[in-house]
Amino acid sequence: QVQLVESGGGLVQTGGSLRLSCVASGSVFRINDMGWYRQAPGKQRELVASITSGGSTDYADSVKGRCSISRDNVKNAVYLQMNSLKPEDTAVYYCNARNPFLYNYWGQGTQVTVSS
């Protein structure tokens, strides 16, 4: 099993920045890709950004140019730097880790609220 613990969410004004962190523990050797998803009230969970074990990244169109994902394979951590935040970025953000068999592990989520 893999456990994921997120931190770094909070309340920020429009245009502000936040950095989300996620640390994995347990059977971390099973982790391949990592990423961040978000879910706003009444909406489906959606991918924000992902990063492979080799460092290749992918971003949702809505956050391109404003967010940056990175990972530290030694610390088994993944980070999401979010800049120029908008009210529509308000959501619960979930850390995700995937093993080579495409099984998904999820964190408990951290709330990000952007006030206008």
Image (cartoon, rainbow, N blue to C red):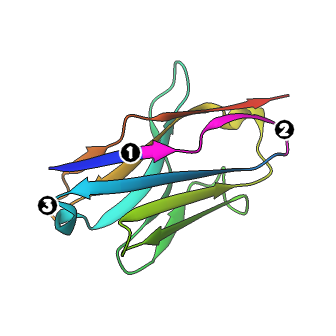
Q: Earlier in the sequence, mark 3 or mark 1?
A: 1
Query: Which one is earlier in the sequence, the residue at label 2 or at label 1?
Result: 1
The answer to whether the residue labelled 3 contacts the one labelled 2, judged by CB atoms less than 8 Å apart, is no
Which label is found at residue 23?
A: none
For the C terminus, the quadrant is: top right
Amino acid type, callout 2: Thr
Which range is magenta? 6-15
Q: Nearer the viewer, residue 27 or 15?
A: 27
Does residue 10 show up magenta in the picture?
yes
Compare marks 3 and 2 and give the one earlier in the sequence.
2
Given residues 75 and 88, the one toward you in this image is 75
Q: In which quadrant of the rendered view does residue 29 lie?
A: bottom left
Identify the amino acid type marked 3. Answer: Phe
Q: Which residue is mark 1?
A: 5
Are discs 3 and 1 less than 8 Å apart at CB? no
Q: Which residue is painted at 66% across and 49% down in the image?
A: 62
Disc assigned to residue 101: 3
Circle 2 SS class: loop
Residue 66 locus on image (x, y percent): 73, 58
Circles 2 and 1 in contact, beta carbons < 8 Å: no
Residue displayed at 81% across by 46% down: 16
- Position of 57 compared to 98: left or right? right
